[in-house]
Amino acid sequence: MFLVSLVGPPNSGKTTLFNLLSGQKVKTVNYPGATIEYYHSKIDKKFGFDVELIDTPGIISLIPASIDEIITIDGIYSHPEYGTPDLIITTVDASQLSRHLVLVNDLIEANFNVVVAITMNDILARKNFEIDFSKLSNELSIPVIKIDTLKENGIDNLVKIIKDYSEKNKNQKEIKRINEDTLALVEKYNKISEIEKKVMISKNSGIINLLNDFKNLHKPDDISLKIDAILLSKTWGLLFFFFAMSVTFASVFWVAAPIMDLIDYGFAYISEWITTLFGINWLTQLLANGLVAGFGSVAVFVPQILILFLILGLLEDSGYLARGAMLVDKPLSKLGLNGRSFAPMVSGFACAVPAIMAARTIPNRRERLLTIFILPLLSCSARIPVYLLLIGFLVPTTGSLTAGIILASIYLLSIVSSLVAAGIINKFKNSIIPNQDHSSFILELPTYKKPKFNNVFFNAFTSTKSYIIGAGPIILIFSIVLWALTFFPAGIDNSISNENGNFEQQLIENSYASNIGKFLEPAVSPLGVDWRVGVAIITSFAAREVFVSSMALMFQVNISDEDSIQKSLLKNMQKAKKSDGTKVFTTSSIIGLIVFFIIAMQCVSTLAITKKETGSWRMPILQFVIYTISAYILAVSSVNLIKFLGIA
Amino acid sequence: MKFRNASQLLKGEQSQILDIDYSHPSARRIIEVGFTPGEEIIVVGKSAFNDPIAYSVRGTVIAIRKSEASCIQVR
Ligand SMILES: Nc1nc2c(ncn2[C@@H]2O[C@H](COP(=O)(O)OP(=O)(O)O)[C@@H](O)[C@H]2O)c(=O)[nH]1
């Protein structure tokens, strides 16, 4: 099928145009280089013909400077799924004509069939300029269309050109890769600047030869300059930065916590309903304790993920994310990271998987690998259910200030540990991650905009959905495997009866899980806990939140309880005794577990994506070994330190 | 008169690019985003730690590191 690709510099209105052509509603990003995936769609049916459309991530030229640009540019030349485009529509911001024509020039030089769509004419008009479109079309020898994406004017003209091309099927010149030295680039720029001068019509004087008019044309957005005077300044800028970050994390927690409670309660209710309705047998046990509990542990962290992606979307869409990156570039570069590590790091608080993918935008390989290396230390949302359970044990009243302070400290500790890890690895200079190219930070600061809530919502929703589809099945499978380990072989042994009330107790005692757990007991006893927690820790290596459902299974949460799973689990945890009669859960053992979860590398999906993004097993193995051993050592030390201080 | 480089400009200061040090590893990208000889640039802001520096160039704002700005020679 006839393939049309949309190509353009970041923030040139490309995605907006894609949505108008496809009749869809996909992501529009304000942060240069944040889109990695390609969106594809058929052209909207209302236009009455059939062509394939793909949207590509924003690029500046056809000569790449980072991995994501290599992928993007390769994808423009020949998309792995859709092939080489028959026609390229390239978006050009009218108010940035000279800068954006660089890419147009490259595309023409590479022999693509190119149509230019000029956007943001309203912004140019506000500067009292307009473009002479037929002149520009003559200068470039390709069609140039004026588009008003907001009022949807000009789309019909563009569609007509696409239709003509798709019907003409004229033979395509051979597409070639382009290569040029920097001097040639400067020359090209000079040529483009000349074109800009020729086609710009000043509304004041008619012709653009008045120097003052031209200065006005190349003046950035006034309001953004005024905002930046504050948000980039030493005191207020940093204050705002910390304020924005605190609000982000606080709202993730305070907004998400009640919703999570509700979800938890809902799944407990379903489990209870299944067993009361159909009685206790292996099938209802599988449904209630395996399947429903598994779905529950997937569903329970959806609220925080969604909220964090929403906030990230707002930061991105408003234009602040790029400023944040600029503010932290200096301190991060001291640790061997980059200002561009900022966006991946914030995403890391939702989930390390998309965060590791977002690290592609870091041009320097070493900084990129180091960023990927430390991302699993940032407190992802899968840890929140674990922390809530453990904090719930330490501070019984939910939502209290103390609980909030503990959670905030955990977040702080996770940030500190990630920075310390970066600093340490950075000290090893070339032995762990070799340095191959120079470090760089060049980032366009887009004009501040009121975020488009529709887009942000849609975007957060899509990210969350792809996350559930990605991580959900693993968690579900492990939940069921875990249930089977706790149910068999005792569950089908008729000698264990349901009558005397401690059916589940006997079930666990005689299960495979118990065999495994008891074998591992020597490893977990320095943490102050017993084999049951050991089993829960082992299962949490599939995905951290599985810990909570494992704990519920290991400590036999009675499903006929009125409380939520968490409440009855906490009750059972209070009562739990080790074989020597001492309590399993004390302040020290709980804090030990928290420390372990802050650092340990317990996520199969993260290891898999690290392997994929770094191209070898080296990085994921290093992450796994270094973080898990450090976590264990630090957890055991904390337990002993707390005991030494005389706290239980 | 001795020429300065862009990293030495003060906040709010305006100047014209004279030349770019093409041997600098970031030179190509710096030119691509719009810093070419002859262009007017203004320092519109410096990060809280004075580095990176944001310049207005060709109608937009670009932040680059001090070390990279030093390859831009200005009047
Ligand atoms: N004023 C104005 N804003 C536009 C126009 N087209 C797009 N935008 C806005 O410009 C921003 C960037 O657009 P987007 O389509 O995400 O650009 P992309 O990064 O090239 O995909 C968004 O906030 C759009 O709403 C236009 O013609 N005029």
Image (spheres, rainbow, N blue to C red):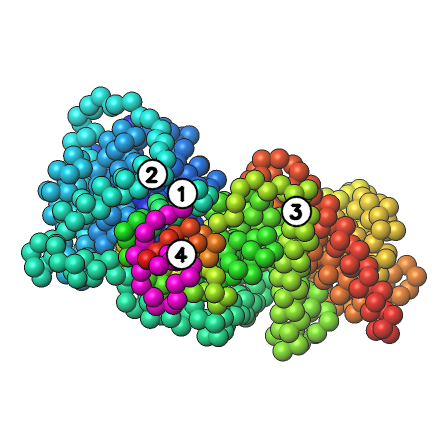
Q: Residue at x 79, y 69 (%)?
A: A587
Chain letter for mark 4, please: B
C-alpha span from label 2 to label 1:
8 Å
Q: Which residues are magenta?
A: B1-21
| Amino acid type for the residue under numbered disc 3 | Lys
Who is closer to the viewer here, A84 or A362? A362
Q: Are labels 3 and 2 assigned to the same chain?
A: yes
Q: Looking at numbered disc 4 in the image, what kind of residue is underneath it?
A: Asn
Q: Magenta stretch: residue B9 in it? A: yes
Circle 2 residue: A183
Residue A638: x, y in percent? Answer: 80, 64
The alpha-carbon separation of the residues under discs 2 and 4 comes to: 19 Å
Q: Which mark is residue B5?
A: 4
In the picture, residue A225 is in which quadrant? bottom left
Residue drawn where x is 47% and y is 65% of the image: B50
Observer-nearest of A492 and A122: A122
Tag of residue B22: 1
Mark 3 touches mark 2? (CB < 8 Å): no
Nearer the observer: mark 3 or 2; the answer is 2
User: Which numbered disc, 3 or 2, marks the residue that appears first in the sequence?
Assistant: 2
Vertical arrangement, residue A229 with respect to residue A216, above or below: below
Q: Which residue is mark 3?
A: A429
The residue lying furthest to the right in this view is A580
Mark 2 on the same chain as mark 1: no
Mark 2: amino acid:
Leu
Is disc 3 on the same chain as disc 4? no
Which tag is nearer the camera, tag 2 or tag 4? 4
Q: Quadrant of the N terminus of chain A?
A: top left
Pointers 2 and 4 within a single chain:
no
